[in-house]
Image: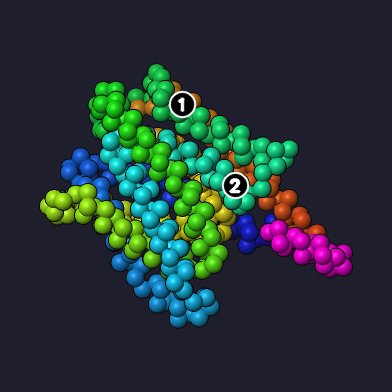
Amino acid sequence: MRRSDWCRDVVSFSAMVALECTNVGLNTLYKAATLKGLNYHVFVVYAYGVAALVLLPSPFITHRRGVLPPLSFSILCKIFVLGLIGCASQTMGYRGINMSSPTLASAISNLVPAFTFILAVIFRMEKLALRSSSSQAKIIGTIVSISGAFVVTLYKGPPIILTPSSSISLHQLQQPLHSSSASSWVIGALFLSVEYFLTPVWYIVQAHIIKEYPSEPTVVFFYTLFVSFSAAIVSLVTEPNLSIWIVRPGIALASILCSGLFGSFLGNTIHTWAIRMKGPVYVAMFKPLAIIIAIAMGIALLGDSLYLGSVFGATIISIGFYTVMWGKAQEEMVEDCIVSSLESPYAEKAPLLQSYKIEEI
């Protein structure tokens, strides 16, 4: 492997892990803000509006470089469709967290790899060969990761590490049968399931847009602008009370600013960059880490106790995660070998074979 490829893999891996850490923290902060009365429609409008404001100079900067194709009406329409998908996904997701907890959101987010892999195969963005060890590893790893996510959420078990802190933790926010009604918990889970079904659709549509217009800041700017605009229309229709738009300094404002800067702006930029560099399946495969990160943040920052179910479930998720990563690595190694063989002097004498490979890629 060349040094540049190795550095790119390390940067991609580190960025996605850091992003999952940020997302868990932002979900927890948002949950605390909703307990103070923050409306989830208003939250989406303001958070994405902050991100669009930060990204405002990006279209002018990238346009001056003169290396990009013109930003046509067709591309803007595709980004608008991406914004509608993102608006529906985010609205469903934040409504689901509002009715349940960040822990449930992290657990259900582990359905994303399965949805993404299936949709990527349907749209021929991933090759599925059942006899191939790499495809088998990705399928088995995805199933194992999802199973581990349900274990760490539904099975608590005896305590392993007890801490004296009485802070509200991610596990304490869960408690579906005690702190919230069962119906709200189920409806919240359904909202979250819809969000994470739309997430891989968002990945795939965005991947097509980036191939056509490879400028992440510009695409993310128009995307965040369209999401904020769409969410504002939905909010004005569903929430006639205009007083909900008033956000005073406090945890609600902090949640909006942090989500706008680190979630909508930085998160979407990293997602868009990673999709162009590694593909939608690679990005989605980091979702199983959310549960592990939630446990680690709870112990280190909130003083949560560690239970057997958390360790057992996290171990299962890790096994599934690295199984998927192994399958992805094997697939890339095979592709690198094929490309290297095509670049050899012998391959230069076989232009038809080379053309066929390029078309396949």
Q: Nearer the viewer, mark 2 or mark 1?
A: 2
For the residue carrying disc 2, how many other residues have a C-alpha within 10 Å: few (<14), some (14-19), or many (20+)? few
In the picture shown, does residue 145 fall above or below 251?
above
Q: Is residue 154 above or below residue 195?
A: above
Question: Is residue 354 found left or right of 35 in the rendered image?
Answer: right
Q: Quadrant of residue 307?
A: top left
Which residue does the image show at 52% across and 50% down from the upper left?
283
Q: Quadrant of the N terminus?
A: bottom right
Q: Which residues are magenta?
A: 342-361
248 falls in the magenta region: no
Whether the residues at callouts 2 and 1 have beta carbons within 8 Å, the answer is no
Q: Residue at x 38, y 48 (%)?
A: 89
Identify residue for label 2. 122
* Residue sitting at x 30%, y 67%: 53
Alpha carbons under labels 2 and 1: distance apart: 29 Å
Residue ID for mark 1: 151
Is residue 197 visible from the viewing direction of this image? yes
Quick check: 227 above or below 178? below
Residue 253: give x, y in percent of width and height: 21, 53
- In reply to whether residue 355 is colored magenta, the answer given is yes
Query: First in sequence: mark 2 or mark 1?
Result: 2
Dot 1 lies on which element? Answer: helix
Whether residue 164 is visible: no
Which amino acid type is marked by label 2?
Answer: Ile
Magenta stretch, main secondary structure, is helix
